[in-house]
Amino acid sequence: MSFTDDIKYRLGKLNILEKIIVINVIIFLVVSILKPVLTGVLTWFELPSDFNSYIIKPWTIISYAFLHYSFVHLLFNMLWLYFIGRIFLTLFRPKTALNIYFLGAIVGGLFFQLGYTIAPDFFKGSGYLIGASAGVRALFIFLCAYSPNKEVQLFSFKLKLWYLGAFFVVIDVLGVFGQDNQGGSLAHLGGVLLGYVYAKQLLKGNDIGSGFEKVMDWLAGWFIIPKKSSNMKTVYKDKTKVGGYTKGEFNQFNNQKKVDLILDKISKSGYDSLTAEEKEFLFKAGK
């Protein structure tokens, strides 16, 4: 096996979020080495706070999320993305991860621009935005909102996901009123909102990223040349699926999850602690 084949093989073994990590690291290395030469070029990939500047380079709403000038900034974001990915991809499709990641980056970028447009005197500091933080926040808060009572190991003790989510949201809110990274904190909150809304809608059976996914598939079709095959088969996409599950499987999964939460509540606080809605749901589920 040649060196090139070995690289292709190793990349093929990575999941979709690990591939995004590799892309970010490669871009960081290239920028770090060639930054003196690329100084003027890089501004065409940073997201400007000024909307008039953004109009002439609309691609920056995505490209900014792949730029990191600080190693610590890159390391923190990529470590978070790696550990979030290990949980996320055991539950959901890779395309769902991409939907949330990129939509989180987009909404985060829009929050950044909106803040600087509405209150330019309040938001100080850099007039551009870079980094994957908004997309990473969106994935993390999605997990917190979708499975709030899921416990994760943190050093020697366990914490429920929603505790961690609430902690980081408070940090981001305080950051908006700070001095160091107001714009970044604003973008984080955009990612938080996207992740939360996406999770709550998915729990209802609505995949709000399906339209974005179709656009991405359409764009990918312009750059991917299909392989010729003598035995071509037509594969029909199952439009009844949500988050990788059929509607029936999805509803059954959510109902079981809700029953488990109610039973957990009974074991801790007793049957009388249930609301009328929870008692009715448990009664119907028992049938």
Image (cartoon, rainbow, N blue to C red):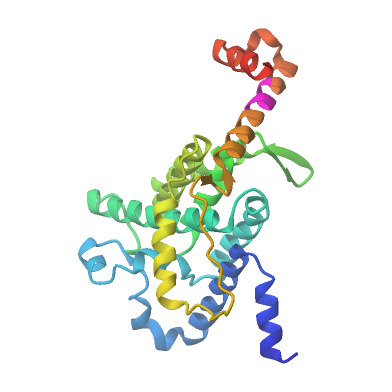
Residue 247, compared with residue 179, is above or below; it is above
**Residue 52 seen by the camera:** yes
Q: Residue at coordinates 34% horizontally, 60% vertically from top-left?
A: 125
Q: Residue furthest bottom?
A: 2
Residue 260 belongs to magenta span: yes
Residue 14 or residue 195, whichever sits in front: 14
- Judge from the rendering whether residue 24 lies leftward or rightward of residue 14; answer left or right: left
Q: Residue at coordinates 71% horizontally, 20% vertically from top-left?
A: 263
The spot of residue 231 in percent (x, y) is 59, 75
The spot of residue 285 in percent (x, y) is 65, 20
The spot of residue 118 in percent (x, y) is 23, 49
- Judge from the rendering whether residue 203 lies leftward or rightward of residue 161; answer left or right: left
Q: Quadrant of residue 6?
A: bottom right
Residue 169, compared with residue 87, is above or below; it is above
Residue 233 belongs to magenta span: no
* Quarter the C terminus occupies: top right
Q: Give, as a single range, the part of the protein colored magenta.
A: 258-262
* Quarter the N terminus occupies: bottom right
Residue 60 or residue 202, whichever sits in front: 202
The spot of residue 266 in percent (x, y) is 71, 16
Q: Main secondary structure of the magenta part?
A: helix
Q: Residue at coordinates 58% horizontally, 58% vertically from top-left?
A: 94
Q: Quadrant of residue 246?
A: top right
Residue 99, compared with residue 58, is above or below; it is above
- Judge from the rendering whether residue 273 lies leftward or rightward of residue 55; answer left or right: right
Q: Residue furthest right?
A: 156
Q: Residue at coordinates 67% horizontally, 83% vertically from top-left?
A: 7
Q: Residue furthest left?
A: 52
- Judge from the rendering whether residue 127 lies leftward or rightward of residue 69; answer left or right: left
**Residue 183 seen by the camera:** no
